[in-house]
Amino acid sequence: MTDELKYQNYLELDTLLSLQNPRSAGSAAMKSTVLSEQFFIIAHQASELWLTQIIADLEAAIDTFTTTDDTSNAEWIVDLLQRAGELMRLLSTQLTALDRLPLRDFAMFRQYLGTASGAQSKQFHRLAHLIGNAEQDGPLYESFVAWVARSGHTISDLARRGIEADVYYRIIEALLDVGNGYWRWQVSHISLITRVMGNHAGTGGTSGANYLISHCTLPFAELRDLRSQAHIGLSVATS
Ligand code: HEM
């Protein structure tokens, strides 16, 4: 007789829910400190889980841009990019929830973090590479540009045509959503840090908030330039 698959097993919850281990638990720390450290761990673990999905979706979009020359899979790319954009929003909301991390508790359990820092997140570095930054496009935008060129269009023409560019328009909008979601995450992160750390240095060895402010970046420069040109074009046409 085969064991019937149940919720607990399918999601491997015994393993998943055994992985939240506040380091302050074995110490003389107060219950509120241990609970706050648990909150901190869960927010990071949940972010890493969503990063797994975001990266997989963006890699699937890049793969499809790279291996097709037409719009046969374009609606699927829209789905992937829209989902990644929505999940970027979710990541920011998780950071906002951390505003509810009591300063006193954080100051207490921070000693247990050692040199552990979000700056060591391999998945975040992978995401940053795929998306690129204000100075340098990443594989996501580069593969999109090459796909558009192979299908006989230019990005500026598609952006100028707006909604008439149909699925290309939806892809451009979805890309901007991903880029703005990424930006929003960085801003929420800085806002959180100023709240719970002030100007204190990070556990990863940086100056903290000031370091992150100087590294904050908005990707997809070309798409944003084309947005501004649309305003110039319209104001000329109507004047
Ligand atoms: C109370 C909560 C948090 C604090 C105080 C905090 C603090 C910091 C600080 C100070 C840095 C700069 C590097 C360093 O010196 O350590 C940093 C970087 C980073 N943190 Fe957080 N963080 C928090 C929550 C999160 C969460 C929930 C995530 C989600 C995974 C995260 C991911 C990252 C990443 C990816 C970086 C590197 C960013 C970059 O290099 O642009 N952090 N964090």
Image (tube, rainbow, N blue to C red):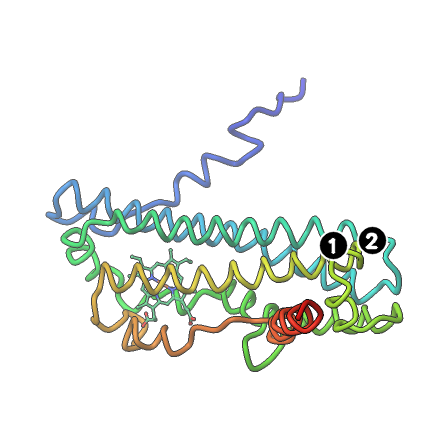
- The residue shown at (64%, 61%) is 175
Q: Secondary structure at mark 1?
A: helix
Q: Is residue 150 above or below residue 7?
A: below
Front-lying residue, 171 or 200:
171
Q: Is residue 69 left or right of residue 217?
A: right
Quote the CA–CA distance across marks 1 and 2: 7 Å
Under mark 2, the amino acid is Asn
Whole-percent x, y for residue 185 in the image: 44, 60
Classify residue 179 by image quadrant: bottom right
Residue bearing mark 2: 73
Q: Is residue 163 above or below residue 153?
A: above
- The residue shown at (39%, 40%) is 18
Q: Is residue 11 left or right of residue 35?
A: right
Whole-percent x, y for residue 45 in the image: 42, 50
Pointer 2: residues within 10 angstroms few (<14), some, or many (20+)?
few
In the displayed orientation, state which residue is furthest to the front.
Answer: 239
Whole-percent x, y for residue 178 in the image: 58, 59
Q: Is residue 18 left or right of residue 149?
A: left
Classify residue 208 by image quadrant: bottom left
Residue bearing mark 1: 77
Q: Secondary structure at mark 2?
A: loop
Marks 1 and 2: CB-CB under 8 Å?
Answer: yes
Ligand 1 is found in the corner quadrant, namely bottom left
Front-lying residue, 100 or 41:
100
Quadrant (top left, top right, bottom left, bottom right) of the C terminus:
bottom right
